[in-house]
């Protein structure tokens, strides 16, 4: 059977669709890059905003138009919240609740659901997303995810470690731990996230380990000591949502601007060159001009490397949907543009700090050839986008790079020194003929709409 997989939304959705790809491949099915070539399609939907729900519907319709014979299986948060609407979309064969999505892909013979799976058919990928936790026990007044995902629950530590060990053995250079409420990992199992991260670092050979979003009230004293291990990526995404104390109270967020600032100070003291990113919601019900100005001032003081900005969208079943006054769309758009400009400014300032420095880059893709030179792109561990021209593709290698100048929304690099993959010191931008390269990033795994 030929299977096409597509996901929208968060990194957790991406982790789930990547795991499905490994399951289908391990069971002997072909995971294809184009819906037109598939017999079956699985769509992992998102409903975090009204726009995300609209895009989920639009995607299903587009897939059906591209291949009217395609059998479409729809899961994810939008399918969970509006199953009847999803079932009525053209081409939909089945709507699968979130609680049953792990059973969509066939299990290989004698495999348990939490068992690490072979990764045949996925070679060439550089980064794997691994779901370690699902659901959330928080009650943020704007969030529909708790309704869609249910209560917090964790995967056994041994199962997570086994999967990561298998991924490292298959050649993945980076693993990202994901969850709806990652910081709550292990509370239902008598353990915690610190113990999980320590176990992965001690028990696997994965070159890089990255954490996805962490709520700013989950981190115990000593948590940042984990970064003494250089394989733990120096990036933290700590969702703020607003820099105004009154807005945070209406959101039922379990933090304050003062507590958040203290946490950031502690993190930066323990993790040099930390990239700090966050989420900001604009236009939350009752957000006055003064509150928004307070939020902007706080965000500027935190000096984020990037801000993900969301215009508030009322979600049925949440407390905020019935709050007043609701903010008009024109005001939301104007506030969103202001936060986005602040994000762009912070990103440029953060990148400029590293010009002239030598840092390791994991090359994740190439942007094609320019004559006899390939345009490679990758990320430092603290999430700086780097571009490098070289006479071969470097995908899935880690090399030291001198960050020379700003370019293309990131930094242009020059290859220097020796690398773990056998690249020897040479002229900037050139790769030793004996250097290891896996070739262009293959397209056969998934089509992923979620940005990294």
Image (spheres, rainbow, N blue to C red):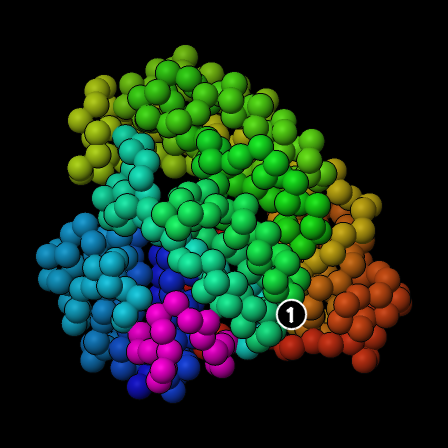
Q: Which contiguous range is marked in magenta?
A: 105-122
For this orientation, the residue located farthest to the front is 190
Q: Position of residue 363 (x, y in %)?
A: 66, 64
Name of the residue lying farthest toward the top: 290
Above or below for 392 versus 300: below
Residue 57 at least partly seen: no
Q: Residue at x 59, y 69 (%)?
A: 168
Q: Is residue 405 above or below residue 325?
A: below
The answer to whether 127 appears left or right of 69 in the picture is right
Quarter of the image holding residue 222? top right
For the point 46% across and 48% down, the residue is 191
Look at the image and tell me whether residue 101 can be seen.
yes
Work out whether residue 333 or residue 128 is closer to the camera in this orientation and state it: 128
- Give whichever of 422, 269 is nearer the camera: 269
User: Which of the pair 103/377 is nearer the observer?
Assistant: 103
User: Residue 320: image x %, image y %?
Assistant: 24, 28
Residue 43 on image: x %, y % = 29, 65
Q: Residues within 10 Å of mark 1 (few under 14, many from 20)?
A: many
Q: Is residue 329 shown above or below 295?
A: below
Q: Which residue is mark 1?
A: 395
Dominant SS of magenta comes to loop
């Amino acid at each position: 059977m030929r299977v096409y997989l597509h996901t929208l939304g968060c990194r957790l959705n991406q982790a789930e669709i990547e795991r499905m790809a490994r399951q289908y491949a391990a069971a002997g099915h072909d995971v294809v890059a184009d819906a037109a070539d598939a017999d079956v399609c699985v769509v992992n939907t998102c409903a975090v905003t009204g726009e995300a729900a609209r895009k989920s519907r639009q995607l299903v319709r587009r897939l059906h138009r591209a291949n009217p014979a395609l059998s479409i299986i729809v899961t994810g948060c939008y399918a969970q919240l509006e199953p009847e609407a999803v079932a009525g979309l053209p081409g939909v064969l089945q709507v699968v609740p979130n609680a049953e999505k792990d059973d969509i892909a066939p299990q290989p013979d004698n495999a348990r659901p939490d068992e690490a799976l072979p990764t045949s058919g996925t070679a060439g990928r550089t980064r794997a997303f691994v779901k370690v936790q699902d659901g959330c026990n928080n009650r943020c007044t704007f969030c529909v995810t708790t309704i869609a995902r249910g209560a917090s629950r964790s995967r056994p530590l041994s199962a997570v470690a086994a999967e990561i060990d298998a991924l490292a053995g298959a050649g993945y250079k980076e693993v990202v731990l994901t969850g709806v409420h990652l910081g709550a990992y292990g509370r239902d199992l008598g353990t915690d996230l610190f113990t999980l991260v320590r176990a992965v670092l001690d028990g696997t050979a994965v070159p890089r380990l990255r954490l996805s979003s962490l709520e700013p009230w989950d981190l115990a004293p000593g948590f940042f000591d984990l970064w003494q291990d250089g394989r733990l990526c120096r990036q933290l995404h700590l969702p703020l949502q607003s820099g105004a104390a009154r807005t945070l109270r209406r959101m039922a967020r379990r933090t304050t601007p003062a507590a958040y600032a203290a946490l950031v100070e502690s993190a930066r003291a323990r993790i040099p060159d930390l990239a700090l990113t966050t989420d900001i919601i604009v236009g939350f019900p009752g957000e006055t001009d003064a509150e928004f100005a307070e939020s902007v001032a706080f965000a500027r003081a935190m000096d984020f490397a990037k801000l993900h900005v969301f215009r508030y969208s009322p979600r049925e079943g949440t407390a905020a949907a019935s709050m007043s006054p609701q903010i008009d769309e024109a005001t939301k758009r104007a506030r969103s543009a202001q936060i986005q400009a602040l994000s762009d400014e912070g990103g440029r300032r953060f990148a400029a700090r590293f010009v002239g420095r030598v840092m390791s880059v994991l090359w994740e893709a190439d942007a094609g050839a320019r004559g006899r030179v390939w345009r490679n792109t990758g990320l430092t561990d603290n999430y700086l986008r780097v571009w490098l021209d070289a006479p071969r593709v470097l995908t899935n290698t880690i090399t030291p790079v001198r960050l020379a100048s700003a370019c293309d929304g990131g930094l242009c690099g020059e290859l220097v020194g020796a690398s773990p993959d056998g690249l020897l010191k040479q002229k900037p931008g050139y790769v030793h003929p004996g250097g290891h390269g896996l070739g262009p990033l293959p397209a056969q795994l998934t089509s992923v709409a979620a940005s990294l």
